[in-house]
Image (cartoon, coloured by chain):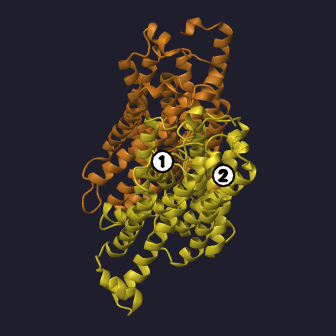
Chain colours: A yellow, B orange
Amino acid sequence: MTVNIQFCEPILNTQSADRQFLSPHIVYAALLLALVAVVLISICVGYRIYSIDQVWRAVVAFDGSETSVVIANLRLPRAIIAPLMGAGLGIAGVLVQTLSRNRIASPDTLGINAGASLGVVIASFWFGVSSLTGLSIAAATGALAASVLVFAIASSAGGLSPLRIVLIGVTFAGLGHSLVEVVLSTNEAQLSQLLFWLSGAFVDRPIALAQTGGPIIVLGAVIAIFLALPLDALQADDSTAIGLGVPLVLVRGLSFLAVSLLTGAAVSMAGPVGFIGLVVPHIARWLVGLSHRRLIPAAALIGAIYATLADVVARFVVYPAEAPVGAITAVVGGIALLVLLKRRAA
Amino acid sequence: MTEMLPTAAKHRSAMSLGAIVAVFGVLSLSTVAFGSTWIPFDQIVGVILGAGEKTQRIIVLQLRLPRVVMAILAGGGMAVAGFLLQKITRNSLASPGVLGVIDGAALGVVIFLALLSNESNALVTSIAYQPVAATIGAFLAITLVFMLSGRQASSAIRLLLFGIAVAAVAKALTVIFMLIGPIYRATQAQRWLAGAVNEVNWGEIQVTAIAILPIMVLALLAARRLPPADLDETSARSVGLNLPVFRILIFALAAALTALSVAFVGAVGFIGLMAPHLARLLVGRNVYAGIIASFLLGAIFLVGADMIVRVLFAPLEVPAGTVTAIIGAPYFLFLLMGKQRNDG
């Protein structure tokens, strides 16, 4: 695969600290605080506003009153699922952008999200899978198949430019959505419920989803952190990475595995919430620089904050109804993509 | 330009055009004939001319014919829009879908429905204005794509990515406005986003036809000045083509054609990409023949796609847009993998 030198240029000074104006510890502390604040807001604020005291009582001493039912069964699950999914997609975005050396790559623009959706829909309709574990596995399998396919197409065509890979990924995503549409149209009974799922939302998710999705995301994150140093080397170009003693095939394979686990788990929890993986790595790089050991935790925190915040915003855009959070992130992400293109980030 | 063609090529082009017309006629008739009950061709012609028994008249005139006529108009309109866009941008990958025109039109319609409905979910104005809203949305989208891309528009792939980003924003806003708008329309609109020609009525066809036909004539008139071959910017300008005003006119025509096609049918993708390519393959580079062949081939694609969903999935209604996407997306991937120059 040929490498365009313009994409390597900012990467070669990975270890230099001149890009950071704050020490990483302060950044992490601030992000952590922000995450706690946003999660609390997500639990307290909505169609009704609850005090922190009420929330505390609903969690510690569940008394079956309407308030505690709403908090424990409706608010709490989404305040747990949203940050989990955001963290997963944030890390997946960093991995994908590094692997493809492409600043506009993300699980969505490469069609990996669409593969996961297709996996879930096919598994649930054609093979009758209904267990949450089964659906998560189906989503991860779909994501893995899609990412392998897109990268295989890209490399078989002989070193495609980052722009072309994204165009292939987006087309592939469109194809995936059409296939999902066919499967859904032929099974109208569950259409309305899955349609909402397909546009991406955190509302009405059973907490059990987090029990299956959470560990998978943690596993993906651990693999990603384990790969941090080789990924730093991979940012430059293949021959540099080989010169530094990086086993390319192994690192790429494990990275694909991590991306598939993270995206698959995220999609199986909330449906395809778009463009989180595109936006988050850019913010993370801006805050902590290019080293993956810092980048991956930062992307996880920022993704979690972003997804939770988008979920809160979605409750008020078409108040009193609720907008799918995927629509909110797609508006933000689409605009971000325009800005990145405009700045010739890729 | 016709005069410049060698006689042999002209002959071949006329033959191809004749063949396309024949396929178009047979396919349209058989789509009307095919369904839960088979209606022979001679009886269809009889019904259209005013004869036939009552049940047959209802099946043909109320159920099957509107569908086919709308598919012809919408498929043809989108194909010609794609033809104009490919010519004027000199970019064979351009089409209404990837330049954000279709999603812009969709957003226009949904905002129109959301703003102009009263509490009881009834429109306060005539449905005939729906195509107007679609046209405005489509034109704003394509204007935005070209303004944002600026100089980068000369790179085929970059232009498309700007289009895809604008389309993504428009699509997401469409979902949000669907929720604000009347709920009964939102359930329709969800299917409408995927593109389907069922449930159209003669009133909608009338509105579409009255608006599309004059624009087709305008497109044919403007065709005289479209660049005959893939000229580059400088030589096109030196022979007086591609002046800014002319470009804007062509973009406006393409946006209007797309918007009118999708206003009642919904987002049927890839016809605007495939039909002009096939037209050029069959009838060569002549612009007039290209426009007519694009229209007919676009109509064939959409009528055929509608036929396929009816054959495969009856009695369920699968949107015809899924078929065009399942065929069109791999074709687009094939083009992307093959075309290696002009990346920018």
Q: Give percent across and percent down for residue B15.
A: 66, 19
Give the label, 2 or 1, closer to the camera. Answer: 1
Q: Nearer the viewer, residue A115 or A30?
A: A30
| Dots 2 and 1 on the same chain | yes
Q: Nearer the viewer, residue B167 or B304?
A: B167
Classify mark 1: residues with Cα within 10 Å, few (<14), some (14-19) or many (20+). Answer: some
Q: Give percent across and percent down for residue B74.
A: 48, 39
From the image, tell me which residue sits under label 1.
Answer: A17
Disc 2 element: helix
| Distance of label 2 from label 1 (alpha carbons) | 19 Å
Q: Is residue A340 above or below residue A22?
A: above
Q: Give percent across and percent down for residue A65.
A: 35, 90
Residue B32, visible in the rendered structure: no
Classify mark 2: residues with Cα within 10 Å, few (<14), some (14-19) or many (20+). Answer: some
The chain under label 1 reads A
Disc 1 element: loop
Q: Is residue B262 above or below residue B239?
A: below
* Quadrant containing the C terminus of chain B in the rendered view: top right
Q: Give percent across and percent down for residue B58.
A: 49, 52
For badge 2, the amino acid type reads Pro
Mark 1 or mark 2, which is nearer the start of the sequence? 1
From the image, tell me which residue sits under label 2.
Answer: A230
Q: Nearer the viewer, residue B105 or B19?
A: B105
The chain under label 2 reads A
Disc 2 + disc 1, Cβ < 8 Å: no
For the point 55% across and 50% down, the residue is A106
For badge 1, the amino acid type reads Ala
* Residue B41, quarter of picture: top right
For the point 47% across and 60% down, the residue is A303
* Residue B318, quarter of picture: bottom right
Q: Is residue B229 above or below residue A190?
A: above
Q: Nearer the viewer, residue A323 or B206?
A: A323
